[in-house]
Amino acid sequence: MKNDPVSDPKSAVSSVHDMRYMTVILTILLAGLFFVSLMVGRLDIGWKEIRTFVCASLFGTPVAPELSSKALVFTLIRFPRCLLAVFVGMGLSISGAVYQGLFRNPLVSPDILGVSAGCTFGAALGLILPGNSFMIVRILSFAFGLTAVCLAVGIARMIAVRPILVLVLAGLVATSVFSALLMVLKYMADPYNDLPAIVFWIMGSLNRVEWNDLYIIMPVVGAGLFLIHVLRYRLNVLSLGDLQARSLGMNPTLYRVIFIMISSLMVAVTVSTCGQVCWIGLVIPHIARTLVGPNHSNMIPVTMLLGGIFLLAADMLARSITAAELPVSIITALTGAPLFVYLLYKNRGSGWI
Amino acid sequence: MNNIFHHIIHTSGKQTLQSLLLGILCFSFSICVFPIRASAHSPSTIVDMAGRNVIVSGRAERIITTFKPATLSVLSLGLADRLVAVDSHSPRVEINTAVYPAMRDLPKIGNRSMGLNLETIMSLKPDLVILYAQKDGIRIADRLAGYHIPAVVIVPENMAAIKDTLRIIAQAAGCPERADRAIQAVDHIMSVVGTRINGLPDQRRKTVYYAGPKGFFSTASGNMLQDEMISMAGGINAAHAFTGFFKSISPEQFVQWNPDAVLACREIRSSAGKYLRKPELAEVTAIKTRQVFCIPSSNAPWDFPSPLSALGVLWAGKRLYPDRFQDVDLIKEIDQFHEILFSRSFTEIGGRLADTVNP
C-alpha cells in the first residue's frame, strides 16, 4: 500500500494529481481510439463519410444514394459494435476491480470466481427452454452468475483459512461445476437446433451486436458503472475488513451484497450479449493499480477507461485483421496473460499478492 | 503323378485324355474362382480412408456407426437391419428413423463431440464399426482392431469421398455390389446438374454465401464440402478463399461480399428470417432480390456429408439458375433417388423441401 492516502497525506495529494492527469490522458486516448475504430473495418469508410453520416443522423441532411448502404452499415453495424466494445470492456474490468476490492484478493475476477461460467450456463439454459425469450436468457444468466459467486464465497467462508488462496480454489470449484452443467446441457441438446445456438452463444464475439442489445447493455452497465463510481470510496472501507468497516459506521454486509449484485448483473448482461471475453476482469484492474495505486477513488475511473480502451482495441483487431473474424478472446488472452505475468513479476515482493 | 498319367493314357486312350484335359481345365478354373467366392465370407484386407489396413471378416452382420454421415451411408446401402447400435445423434435425424424406425430402440454408444463408450461398443460384439477421422476416431479404430473388431475410418468430406465411403462400407460389410447402385444414383444426379451448368460463363456464375449451423455470420471455408457443392451447382462460394473449418465473419464482410444468393443451413432457419428485415443488409443483392433460401430438407440436412449431398447440389442448381433447370422436375428426381437408396420415396416418408425463409 505505498500510495495509501490515509497514512500519507502528501502521497494523497500527488496521487490526486497523477490521477487527474491519467484520467485526462486515458479519456483522450479512448476518444481517439474510438474515432479510429469507427474508420477501421472490412468496408472502407473514411472520416469525411463518417461526418456525412453523423450529420445525416443528427440533422437529417440527405445522404447520397451510393453511400446509403455504407451509411446503414456504419450506423447499424460498426458504430454499435464500437460502443458495445467500450461498454463491455468497462463493465468487465470494473466487475473485476470490485471483486478484487470486495474480497481483498487481487487474484479474483469474474472468470476466476465462476461468475462467467455461471452466466454462460444460465444463458445456455435459457436458450434450450421452450419460448426462447431473450429476457429469460438474461435473467437466468444473472441468476446463475449470482449463484456461482455465492457458491464460491460460501465455500471460502466455510473453510475460513488462507482466504486469498481458498477463494481462488472455491472459484475454481464453481467454474468447474457450471462448466460441467453446461456440458450436460450440450450433451442433451438437440444437435440440429439447440446445440448450434448454444455453441454460437458461448463463442466470445461482438459480431452479432445490434442496437437492441445496446438498449439493454447501455443502461444496465451505465448505471452499474455510475453506482460503483459513486460508491467507490466504500470499497476502500470494505477492503480494510468487516471489523474496520463497522467501526467506521458502515454496514459491510449490505454493501457487499450491493456490490456483488451490481457486478454480477454487469457480467450477466455482457455474457448474454457477447459470450465470455476472458482476462479483462483480471488484468485491467492490475494495470490500473500499477498506474495510480490501490486507492479505489483513483483506481476505479482509471480501470473503467483502460477496460474500454483495451477491449475496443482488441475488437478492432479481431474484426479487421482477416476477412474472417478472430474470436476476440484469443486476442484478450494472448495480450492479457503475458501482461499479467509481467505485472506479477514487476510487483513481486511488494505485498501485492 | 507321371505314372498315373501314363497309366491312364495307356489304358483309356484318346477320349480319356480329352476328359482329363477338361477336368484339369475345370480344376484350374475352380482354383481361380474359389478364392474370389471365398473372399466374400473369409477375412480379407481393405484400406480405409485414413490409410489404415483393416482386416474385415467377409460379411458383416453386426454394424455400429459412430456419427451421422456413417449412419446415413449405411442406410443408403440398404444395410439398416444389420445395425446393432448407433451414435446418440443419429436417431435425431428424421430421415434415419423414417427409413428405419427400429433405430430409436437401438443402443446408443455416445457421439463424436462428447466421446464414445468403448465398453458398450465391445459388449455388443460388432463385426464392423464405422468411425470418424477427427478427435479420437482413429485411436479408437486402432484399439478396436487390437481386439480383432474390424473398424473402418471414413472421411466423407467431399463428393468423391462420399462415393468412396459408400464403396468402403459396402466392401467392409461384404456386399460391394450395393455401393454401385447408390453411386450410380449419385452420378445420375450429378450428371443432371453437370449438363445444365456446363458452359455457364464465369461472369454469369452467382456468388453464393453459405450461412452455417453456428449462425448466419458463420460460413464454410474453401476446404469444405459446402464450398464444393456450391461450385458444382454453378455458384462461387463467397468465402472460397478461407481455409479450415466454419469461420465467423463480421456483418460488414457480408455487405462487402454482396452475394447474389444466400443458402442458409436448416439449423438456423428460424433465425435466418430476421436478417432479411435488417435495414443494414437490405442493399445486399441476395436480400434485395429475395434470393435467400434454406437448404432442404425437412428430414435431413442436404448440405452435410452423405449421399444426399448430391440432392443438395441439384436443389442449389435449380434455385440459382431456374432458367437452366426448367426441364428438371425436382421432386421427381428426389423421389427416384430416395427410392433407389432407401426403397421408399421422399414423398412417401413425409419429406418436404422446406426451403423458404420467411422474413
Image (cartoon, coloured by chain):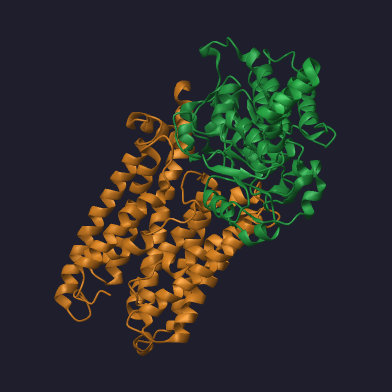
Chain colours: A orange, B green
Residue that appears at 69% across and 17% down? B192
Q: Quadrant of residue B359?
A: top right
Q: Is residue A155 above or below residue A327?
A: below
Residue A323 position, x and y percent, is 41, 34
Q: Determine the residue positioned at 41% across, 63% down.
A: A226
Is residue A203 depicted above or below B322 in this figure?
below
Residue A81 at x, y percent in the picture: 44, 44
Quick one: quadrant of the C terminus of chain A? bottom left
Q: Is residue B39 left or right of residue A284?
A: right
Q: Residue furthest right?
A: B348
Quadrant where the N terminus of chain A is found in the figure: bottom left
* Residue A11 visible (yes or no): yes
Q: Nearer the viewer, residue B191 or B214?
A: B191
Q: Is residue A340 above or below residue A158?
A: above
Q: Quadrant of residue B37?
A: top right
Q: Residue at x 33, y 47 (%)?
A: A313
Residue found at the very far left of the displayed protein: A10
Asked if residue A136 shows in the view, the reply is no
B185 sits to left or right of A315: right
Question: On the rendered structure, is B193 left or right of A48?
Answer: right
Task: Please tell me which residue lies in front, B198 or B264.
Answer: B198
Out of A316 and A344, give the one closest to the viewer: A344
**Quarter residue B178 falls in:** top right
Residue B211 coordinates in the image, percent (x, y): 57, 35
* Labels in figure, total: 0
**Image x and y of residue B201, in percent:** 54, 10
